[in-house]
Image (cartoon, rainbow, N blue to C red):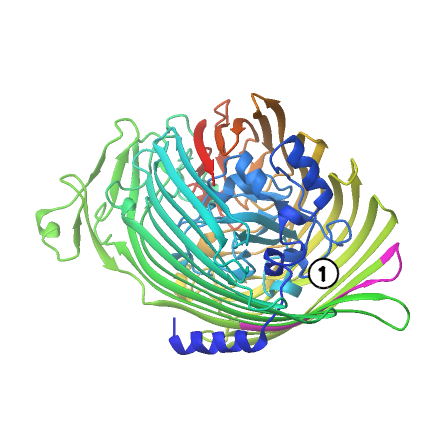
Amino acid sequence: MNKNKLNLCISFIMGSLAYPASYNALAQPPSSESADQAEPELREEVIVHGFQRDYLQNSAASAVGLDLSLKETPAAISVITQDILQDQQVNNVDDALRNVAGVTKFKTGNGGEEKFSIRGFDASQSIYKDGARINNALNVSNIPSTETANIERIDVLKGPSALLYGQGEPGGIINYITKKPQFETVGSLEILAGNENFNKIEGDYGSAIDSNNRFAFRVVGAYEDSESFRNAVERQRLLLNPTLLWQFTEEGSLLIGYEYIDDDYTNERGQVLELTNPQANPSQHNYAYTDRINIEDFFGIPGWNNQTTVSSERLYLTANYTFTPAWRLEATYSTTSSEKDNFDSSPSPLVSGSDLVSIGPRKSIGEGEAEQITLKNFIDFDDAFGFEHEILASLTHENANSESVSFRADRNQTDRGNVFFNIVSGEYFANFTAEEAADPDFVQIDNNIGFILRARDPLINDDREESGLNILDFMRINESWSVLFGGRFSEYKDKLGDAEEDNFSARLGLVYEPNAMTSIYASFSEGFTPSIGLLGEDDRTVDPEESTAYEIGVKWSLNDEKLLLTAAVFEVELEGIPFVINPFDENGMETPFEDLRYNNLGSVQTEGLELELVGFIQPNWRIQGGYAYIDNEIADGGTGEFGSIFPRGNRFPGIAAHNFNLFSFYEIPIWEGELGLGAGAFFQGDTFISTENRGEYDGWTTFDLAAYFKKNQWKAQLNIRNISDEEYRLAQALTTSDGFAAIRVGTSTPRTITASLAYEF
């Protein structure tokens, strides 16, 4: 990172001295960002019956920017609290987000990053950490998959998020909130072990540095060394995250944090389908998953894919200051950089009647950086009509750039450059000559595997920036009626595509509270997504996609405000989706990827229903449950990359019409400690394999069991996921053709057993 930029940023932040609702909670009165202090009465009761377990987070500050309760916020918001993460012994965000109605997990991306959809729309580029975007458009330069050891909670905001976060898909955003310093001592050391040689250690410690409560620190660290149920797949990951809080006056504070992640793993693309009736016309091919393929088979190259390494560094600062009881100011700076060496293999479908799968070696080297500066004003006042206003006025500037170069196996001769895997014998081999082995670009894995690898593409770059002005006003008209309204003006620049776009996104919400336990809301919101790197006929980046969403919902606060039931119906439309306008050249041949040109031709509509129940049924019985119905349809289609066909009226692949999740824990006081017993069920309906909708993956249901015993400062825990060993398939992504889906098949993880022993300081 440029030192001048850092010095300028620190000067800017120290000069602004902002006040956030989040970090003031660490030393000042309670706020929404502190889960421990959100509802004091509830916390007292839980301490008596257990040890501060709570699934209900009663704040939406991270999601909408204002310190509103979930009940008065006109939007569907899901919060995965620290207690859910601990009860389920979550070690990856895939397992965490299955607790959110409307979120679908795809097969992990090519570079190991997370891939999700929200309400039927891709959310892979709408993932944030502490409010700052962390993923780049080019997956070769993406950060490592998220480490959960330093995650305090996960907020999921449904619907277009352009008003607060700028560009993004219309389904919603995922925001990981990390652990921050406190002036009370917190600390734990936990050792985890499981089947498939899973081993992990996590440490977390923080406290005040001085007796005047001016300085506090926190350090979170983790190391994982694990294998997989898949042959030849392994991972070693290191996390280090120190943070320092300086409360320099009662009104102001400064937080500085640094996060380092080093991830060495085997790049694993998934499995393949079998081509059941080979014909000359690829559009007539049929693909199916065959029992001849073992779920443990690895369709990469041992000794090659396991060289993948990626490191990420994140520096973040938050300064805050309270000028008056009615005016607070917050300034934040975040920069994330990553470097990745991606060792990859691309298999072909298994041809019917053959036992061999052809695998093409690949390699890509990339790096990326994202930088964000935000200045927020929080203003509270009563107007002349007696209406109460909570206003957020903010400025945001974001830069992101990445570059990469890729290498491919030389395939000038038949069968040269490929590696073959025999699904019967489990052996790998390659065909090469002594002359080829003498080539300076020849890669020798072992006596049976070797190939020539050459640079295939020129350097691929991405350089963009976005600036936004956002104004949001939550106006309480009286005890029953409230209105949320605002807008964001964004200016987006694609420096490499020589394109500039302006966008205005509006948001409007109406809340009616007939009594203290019930709220009814309606909302309208807009969003946009730039078409990064997609060029039109004039060689300029095509127009961004635009989205609109309508939502009506009801929230019931039950069981003396310890249980929240949310029901919402929604309609979302995404318009202006870029589709390829020159899939074939004048000779009828497939257009090379670098020569493809696009136009904004398509649209997708999604309608649905979501139900969510979170909180305490009894003081020692907690629950997290949800159901989603998603009716997803391509309203106007076309031809996408890699030959993907988007027929009008079809559904996106991987999006099930029905999803269900339920997880519950019951605590029993015993032996002067607490015995916790938990169970969960997770269901997803049938999904299409590709946008062509000619093949389906069957739906599935998995069951989990969990138990812990905690006494004083010790806790022992056991978690079993997928106890019935259910086997199922996951789609690659929302834009997958039959041919591409056939070589990017995600699979379920078999029964997983994890045991842990923790000591709290």
Residue 545 vs residue 732: left or right? right
Residue at image mark 1? 525
Residue 466, x across and y down, in percent? 55, 72
Q: Is residue 163 above or below residue 540?
A: above
Residue 498 visible in the snapshot: no
SS type, badge 1: strand
Badge count? 1
Q: Is residue 434 above or below residue 17?
A: above
Q: Which residues are magenta?
A: 466-481
Residue drawn at (28%, 57%) of the image: 407
Residue drawn at (55%, 31%) of the image: 698
Using the image as rendered, state which of residue 523 and residue 621 is in the foreground.
Answer: 621
Residue 541 vs residue 744: left or right? right
Q: Is residue 11 above or below residue 744?
A: below
Determine if the magenta segment contains residue 645.
no
- Which quadrant: the N terminus? bottom left
